[in-house]
Each structure stands twice: as structure tokens, then as C-alpha cells.
Amino acid sequence: MKILLCVALLSLPARGYADDQVATTGRVLPLETFDEYPPASFPEQWKVRGDETKARAIYQVAEEGGNHFLHARAEKQDVQIGLSHAFQPKEFPLLRWRWRVSDTRTTG
């Protein structure tokens, strides 16, 4: 089974209730937009948990319609990457991200 995972724009805070929070605090802290990375590159600020060579093959920045995002494609692999960022939870109590999953399996 092949699964395609796309992650885009990590930021604080979240939608709906978060819009009220932003209006109250007036603050949004973008954690990652992937805009600084060219397509087909590995996001260098992200840390690898597991085999780095496999991580670089699985995770790459992609671009679609001017929107940069993290693209992951893996089959029976368990490498993780993450971004560490310190912030005050009381100042930024909500987290927002966008993602989508596409199943690329063929039927038949």
C-alpha cells in the first residue's frame, strides 16, 4: 500500500475560536511555511528520528499553486521528522495546521 501525505503551513493559533484569540492577542506565530526551501529539498531545520537517509528520501518540500508544503511518501517505513520551537502556551494557546492524505493505491 502506498500512501501520499501532504502537510502545509504550521502556525499558531487555530481557526474558529482561534480567530477570536488572534483578535484578542493580535499575535500569530508561524512555525513553518516551507517557503524558504526549494521544491524537492529536505527541510534542513527539521530533526530526524530514525534513519536520516530514509528520511531524506521520504520527506521533501513540494509546491503546488504557489503553496509550499511538506510531501511524504513511504511504504512500510517508520522514519519521523519534527520541528522544535519554544513558545509560551499562554501567549499562543492554539495550534493550526493544514494537511491532506491521498491514497495512491491502484485497484485491480
Image: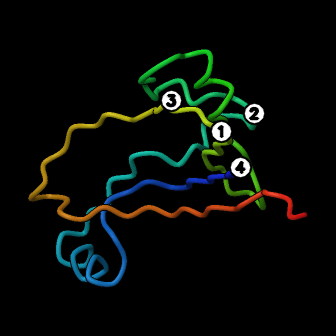
Mark 4 is on which residue type? Met
Mark 4 or 3: in front is 4
Mark 3 is on which residue type? Val
Q: Is mark 1 in CB contact (under 8 Å) with mark 3?
A: yes
Residue 1 is tagged as 4
Q: Is residue 85 left or right of residue 56?
A: left
Gap between marks 3 and 2 measured at Cα: 18 Å
- Assess disc 4: are there few (<14), some (14-19) or many (≥20) residues with their C-alpha within 10 Å of its C-alpha: few
Of the two numbered discs 3 and 2 on the same chain, state the one appearing first in sequence: 2
- Report x, y in % for residue 71: 65, 45
In the picture of the structure, the residue carrying the numbered disc 3 is: 79
Residue 74 is tagged as 1
30 vs 94, nearest the viewer: 94
Measuring 60% from the left and 45% from the top, which residue is drawn there?
Answer: 70
> Is residue 73 positioned above or below 3 on the image?
above
- Report x, y in % for residue 1: 71, 49
Measuring 32% from the left and 53% from the top, which residue is drawn there?
Answer: 29
Q: Secondary structure at mark 3?
A: loop
Measuring 46% from the left and 45% from the top, which residue is drawn there?
Answer: 32
- Report x, y in % for residue 74: 65, 39
Mark 2 is on which residue type? Ala
Q: Secondary structure at mark 4?
A: loop
Q: In this view, which residue lies farthest toward the right?
A: 108
Mark 3 or 2: in front is 3
